[in-house]
Amino acid sequence: MKLITAIIPEEKLDEVREALIEAEIERITVARVSGHGRQQEIVVQRGKKVVPNLIPKVQITIACNDEFEDITVDTIVRTARHGEGAVGDGKIFVQDLKECVRIRTGERGGQAI
Amino acid sequence: MTWKRTLGCVAAFGVGFPLLAQGSGPVNDSGATAWMLTSTTLVLLMVPGLAMFYGGLVRTKNVLGTMMHSFAAMAVVGVLWAVLGYALSFGPNVLGGLIGWSRGLVLLRSIDHTILPAGVPEYAFAMFQGKFAIITPALIAGAVAERISFRGWVVFITLWVIFVYCPLCHWVWASDGYFYNLGAKGAIDFAGGTVVHISSGVAGLALALFLGARHGYPKTAMAPNNLTFTLIGAGLLWVGWFGFNAGSSIASNLDTARALTVTQVAAATGALTWVLIETIRDDKPTSLGMASGILAGLVVITPAAGVVQVGGAMALAAIASCCCFGMILLKNRLGYDDSLDAFGIHGTGGIVGALGLTFFIRDSWWAEAAAKAPGWGILSQLKVQVFAVGSTIVFSVCMTLLIAFLVEKFVGLRVNEAVEKTGLDHEIHGERAYGLNNLN
């Protein structure tokens, strides 16, 4: 099992989510997060340029069985990218997932996903 | 100046007063003036109220963009009205009565010393009317929220106020206007059922159809981001509406108190009815339903506040809530994107009020009407109301589409898809509504 965490631009959420649903990845968790990478966003406030040190992004977390790893990652990369790719398009982290438990039934492992 | 000018919206209360020459004119009535200044302030309070009402209903990414539509109206029309809006609306007939005009009223120069026969400085009347001109275009924004460009909006409301609002205002409220002189005692529009609510409601519908639906509508759920805002906004609108309706008597007397009373009763009845419908139908009284019902009640009583009594106000408000609720269900079935139901509530409620009031007019009004035109009855008045409502709808829809077409062609009216997806706040204004979502 894998745990896939993707940090994507806010405006791409709908597109990514629709594509994931189309690829039959229907179980996801979404959160608003702030952070910084290489992207710098300059904001003008009352005529003064301000560089906020934290930029809002959306974080998607998906737990899946191994065979779904590639399609999930590929779908997110394809839909979250701006055109040919731009700084700020985000990152995807993939980790091995030790255990998964469905609270309702107590099932464990791959079938609980 | 020797021409006559009406002192407001009082088609129901008799003829316009002659405006007397400076110096020998009427004396200031401090009571009436104090109430008119208060009303003017209250009506302005409705605009930030509307901004909050609409701002709470859109998605998180469009909050500031949506609130800016209302604030832009305050800024744009605030200037426009003083420069030429008042002259176009309350100047004497020109172009065969299509509109008013008086050069002296440009920049309000000729009213510097004027006290109206009602005992109110004309400045107070002009500013009071100016607030109506601000809120009317701001109402339209609800129909086209989340997809109209700021630049296009500013140009649109400028043209719309000049070519739609000012003529309508002149027809209904100037003493030489078309509708003011229809039938026995004129078409009844106490505080702006036709001028404000029907004209903006149908303009919103026309503009929404012209622009097309938001990306993803109706498939994607577009839930309100903050109903707390919406409730506060509805509350501010309710409070401000006392200035809007009771101030429209341009006096501080019995008529004022009558208008204030039916306004209060109608808002409460509208809210109660809407929540009751929801409870019976879906088992859940919602806060959005409460806010919508308040608005439906307030809208419907606007044209009627001068002629109906408490029972009539309750009946009209209950009918309005049912009709507006039905219209929103119908919208969902037909699939057009009147995003925040500007037509569903203001258009529908305004039409119900302007026509329905005929059946609830107080007896003393009928007696006065019969004295002027023997045999004047419900049917004759209904004809006048239907004519006023019909003309308003046709005029507003045609002119709105024409203006929208021109603005789309020369300035651009709808934002592109990328801006719409990211949101108006960030893309157009470079800001975000909620700091909490960004830890900076």
Image (cartoon, helix red, strand yellow):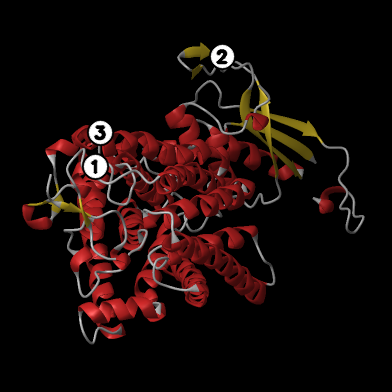
Let me know if residue B222 appears in the view. Answer: no
Picture disc at residue B96: none
Instruction: For mark 2, give the secondary structure.
Output: loop
Discs 1 and 2 carry the same chain letter: no
Q: Which of marks 3 and 1 is nearer the N terminus?
A: 1
The answer to which image quadrant residue B151 occupies is top left
Above or below, B192 relative to B322 = above
Please tell me in which quadrant of the rendered image residue B249 appears.
bottom left
Give the amino acid type for the residue marked by disc 1 in the picture.
Gly
Please name the residue that numbered disc 1 is placed on: B85
Cα distance in 3D space between marks 2 and 3: 50 Å
Q: In the picture shown, does residue B142 fall above or below B424?
A: below
**Labels 3 and 1 share a subunit:** yes
Q: Which chain carries label 2?
A: A
Nearer the observer, disc 2 or disc 3? Answer: 3
Residue labelled with disc 2: A51
